[in-house]
Every structure is written in C-alpha cells, then in structure tokens.
C-alpha cells in the first residue's frame, strides 16, 4: 500500500469511528429525551400535587441539559476531527 493510499485509509477510518461515536451519542440523546417525556407525563398525571409540577420542571430542564451537553460533545468531536485531519502531513 502506498503512502497516499495509507493516508486515505487512515482518514477514512477516523471518519468511520467519529460517525459511529456521533451515532451512539445521538441514540443516547434520543433515549434521554424519551425518558424525560415519560417523566413529564408522570408529572402531568400528578399535576394537582407539588411533586407533579416538580417532575414537569425537572424533566424540561433535564432534557434541555441533555440536548445541549450531547450537541456540545458532537461539535467538539467534529472540530477535533477536522483539526486532526487537516494537521496531518
């Protein structure tokens, strides 16, 4: 395998690993948002009590935090991948 082919192969492997990691993060994000939705639904069923209102607020803040946190990690991975690939000789 020539040097150019080796660089292309390594570049392709890095992209495959990053895409797999991003897919796992997005799956985790979806599961977290579904769980937050069930928490909010439980809160709606208990709306007359303080615990119901607390569950709704906690699920909204939890889903927002989860979304921002995972999107941040996806952005960091994407930027680091571009820096690493562009800095290779």
Image: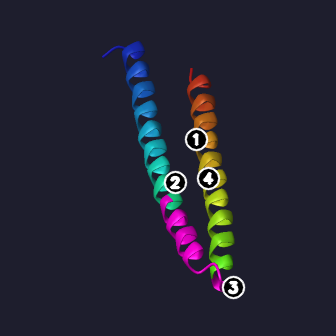
Indicate which label's residue lies in the foreground, 3 or 1.
3
In the rendered image, residue 37 lying in the magenta stretch gets the answer: yes
Q: Is residue 45 shown above or below 66? A: below
Please identify the dominant SS of the magenta region. Answer: helix
Which percent across, then down, holds residue 74? 58, 43
Is 33 on the left-hand or right-hand side of 17?
right
Looking at the rendered structure, the secondary structure element under dot 2 is helix
Residue 50: which numbered mark, if any?
Answer: 3
Which region of the structure is painted magenta? 34-51
Q: Residues within 10 Å of mark 2 (few under 14, many from 20)?
A: some
Residue linked to disc 1: 77
Is 6 on the left-hand or right-hand side of 73?
left
Is residue 60 or residue 7 the one in the foreground? 60
Looking at the rendered structure, the secondary structure element under dot 3 is helix
Indicate which label's residue lies in the foreground, 2 or 1.
2
Is 80 on the left-hand or right-hand side of 13?
right
In primary-sequence order, the first of circles 2 and 1 is 2
Report, in whole angstroms, how far the alpha carbon at label 3 lies from the one at label 2.
28 Å
Residue linked to disc 2: 29
Residue placed at 51% from the left, 61% from the top?
A: 32
Image marks 4 and 2: residues in contact by CB distance under 8 Å: yes
In primary-sequence order, the first of circles 1 and 4 is 4
Residue placed at 41% from the left, 41% from the top?
A: 20
Residue 67: which numbered mark, if any?
Answer: 4
Which percent across, then down, holds residue 4? 42, 13
In primary-sequence order, the first of circles 3 and 1 is 3
């Amino acid at each position: 395998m020539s040097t150019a082919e080796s660089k292309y192969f390594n570049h392709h492997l890095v992209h495959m690993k990053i895409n797999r990691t991003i897919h796992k993060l997005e799956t985790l994000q979806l599961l977290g948002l579904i769980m937050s939705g069930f928490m909010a639904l439980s809160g709606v069923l208990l709306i007359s009590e303080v615990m119901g209102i607390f569950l709704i607020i906690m699920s909204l803040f939890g889903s927002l935090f989860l979304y921002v946190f995972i999107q941040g990690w996806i952005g960091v991975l994407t930027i680091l991948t571009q820096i690493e690939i562009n800095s290779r000789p």
